[in-house]
Image (cartoon, helix red, strand yellow):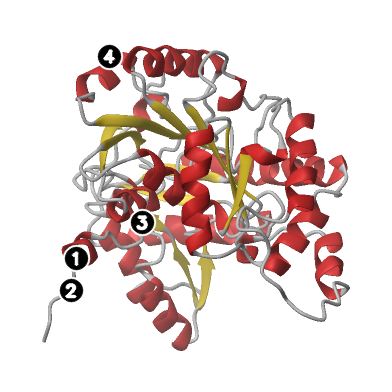
Amino acid sequence: MPSISQRGIIMPSSPIRKLVPYAEQAKARGLRVFHLNIGQPDILTPEVAISAVKNANLPIIEYSHSAGMPEYRRKLSKYYHAAGINVSPDEMLITCGGSEAVLFAFMSCLDPLDEVIVPEPFYANYEAFATSAGACVKPITATIETGFTLPSIDEFEKVITPRTKAIMICNPNNPTGYLYSEKEFMQLRDLIIKHDLFLISDEVYREFCYDGARHYSSMFLEGVEDNVIMIDSVSKRYSECGLRIGALVTKNREVLASALKQAQSRLCPPTYGQIAAMASLDVPESYFRKMNEEYCKRRNFLLEGLNRIPGVYSPMPRGAFYTVAKLPVDDSDKFCQWLLADFSYNNQTLMLAPASGFYSNRTLGRNEVRIAYVLNVDDLAIALDLLARALRSYPGRTPESGSPIVY
């Protein structure tokens, strides 16, 4: 039998989805599984998007432009202008989700064996996209003890080599919920100027900022316009994960030209997805205000509950809808599997994402999990009770330690 490619062998599996078979088996046994493992919002998709698809009445579902429908890009440009991001319709490329935008950015900026620096923990698929491009992720570690703040610039300098081509961040961050400040962006700006690097910024959670915090976009940075590539998506913003509509936005013409050639090879983004995404741009500001209030309520409830459980600690996230929690367990991979395979209470159990999969160094995050607070408060209350009960009975529980000092 012929062997598969080395790329196929080293491609990392998803830490978010690898436990799905265990969840399916738990459900087959009659258990209700509370899914806190994946960032699938339960907020309703805007009705204008649903109606736009229902009423499209297309006699032929044609290919669109490889860069995306011109009318959608024009409308999206206005959305960005309202957010203070001054880009024209020809400075963006509509992609099959934010994931394809990251892949196009890597394929356009990185040669085989080139390096992209990413603060860890990071969205696990970044490593998969780098592998697809033949490139390498060079991690620098942010820690739960400091609330996952951006590591010092000295830490970046230590890992920069002649093969370093880019730095990638996610703001607000998945999986930690950390919201990067303007000061941190200015530090990154100086660094990419010094070493002539790309800054690839995943900003799909732009609307999810709490406590009155303002989202600072990489596109605000002056003097580095040709260095910056912004990644975007409608998946979380409008609760449209299945549309698979994202965007790559940059003023760098060479990057856009390269990305367009890749886009041409996959022909076009989904037609109905673009129709729905374009209609979604008409939702009123009240939609985001209500969504923000709801997630803030969930965040506060979850974090208060987590930090009341003996041995559990989670810093307060200021963006997205995730938090990373440290648990008193020997191995979070084993614990998350045990939850689905061996634990239940009142015919219910819990699905979490082991945090080790969000670190390039798999020895890190072994006692941490990512929790997505995408369930309503009533369900979060049940989930917190299940977690507390599970930790009391888990055979691999470790001695409790106090909450770390956050500086």
Give the amino acid at mark 3: Leu
Give the amino acid at mark 2: Ile
User: Which element is circle 3 on?
Assistant: helix
In space, the residues marked 2 and 4 are separated at their CA atoms by 40 Å
Residue at left offset 60%, top offset 56%: 380
In space, the residues marked 2 and 3 are separated at their CA atoms by 41 Å
In the picture of the structure, the residue carrying the numbered disc 4 is 154
Give the amino acid at mark 4: Asp
In the picture of the structure, the residue carrying the numbered disc 2 is 4
In the picture of the structure, the residue carrying the numbered disc 1 is 9
Q: Residues within 10 Å of mark 4 (few under 14, many from 20)?
A: few
Q: Determine whether label 2 and label 4 are within 8 Å by CB.
A: no
In space, the residues marked 1 and 3 are separated at their CA atoms by 35 Å
**Quarter of the image with the C terminus in it:** top left
Query: Mark 1 or mark 4, which is nearer to you?
Result: 1
Q: Determine whether label 1 and label 4 are within 8 Å by CB.
A: no
In the picture of the structure, the residue carrying the numbered disc 3 is 391
Say which of 258 and 56 sits in front.
Answer: 258
N-terminal of the pair, mark 2 or mark 3, is 2
Say which of 354 and 300 sits in front.
Answer: 354
Query: Mark 4 or mark 3, which is nearer to you?
Result: 4
Query: Mark 2 or mark 4, which is nearer to you?
Result: 2
